[in-house]
Amino acid sequence: MRVLLFFDQTQAGAGGKERPDVKLAVEKGGIGSYHMFEGNLKEIEATVLATMYCGNGYFFNHEEEVKRKVVGLVKKLKADIVICGPCFDYRDYSEMSAILAQEIENQTESKAIVMCSKENNDVITKYKDDVSIVRMPKKGGTGLRDSFSNMAKVILAKSNNEPIKNYSLFIY
């Protein structure tokens, strides 16, 4: 299975909240937070082709450009699935991930998921009917390992075109 990741600047290791202007970039393979769930992806025979990332400020100031470039890369690399997250309880990252996941599912043949915590309720409520949003704890919360295992189950189910009822326990 061919996977692309989308991170914000923090999860990519390109800066923290003080760097919201990080431009859209792509690095080969998995970087940053990927190493937290690398084993879960290997278990389902998923290979990370590249990690895309940008700052939340950059995204919201250049939304159409970022969506166009991300969709273009997804098509070019023929990704089976795009993982947007883990977003934890970061609202801006959750929102930009949901926007991108929706765009990817609407404009490509690829699947996309978002992973965020319940603290992002407004984003979840707005996008959960259009995008698979995997449950996870907030930053520092308990259950992170289980949420990555559940993420892998959702990815596998979506890639096999299984009905939502087969993975509904793991999404909002």
Image (cartoon, rainbow, N blue to C red):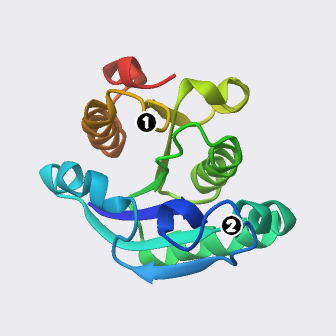
Is 27 drawn above or below residue 141 in the view shown? Answer: below
Amino acid at pointer 1: Gly
Camera sees residue 129: no
* Residue position for label 1: 140
**Left of 15 or right of it: where is 132?**
left
Give the number of the disc on residue 55.
Answer: 2
Return the disc, 1 or 2, that comes first in the chain's sequence: 2
Q: Dot 1: what SS? A: loop
Which residue: 55% across, 62% down?
10
Residue density around tag 1, few if under 14, some if 14–19, many if 20 or more, within 10 Å: few
Quarter location, residue 118: top right
Task: Give the alpha-carbon distance from disc 1 to disc 2, as whole Å.
Answer: 22 Å
Q: Where is residue 150 in the image (x, y as percent from the top left)?
A: 29, 32
Amino acid at pointer 2: Gly
**Left of 15 or right of it: where is 110?**
left
Is 28 drawn above or below residue 5 in the view shown? Answer: below
Q: Position of residue 101 (x, y in %)?
A: 59, 50
Camera sees residue 132: yes
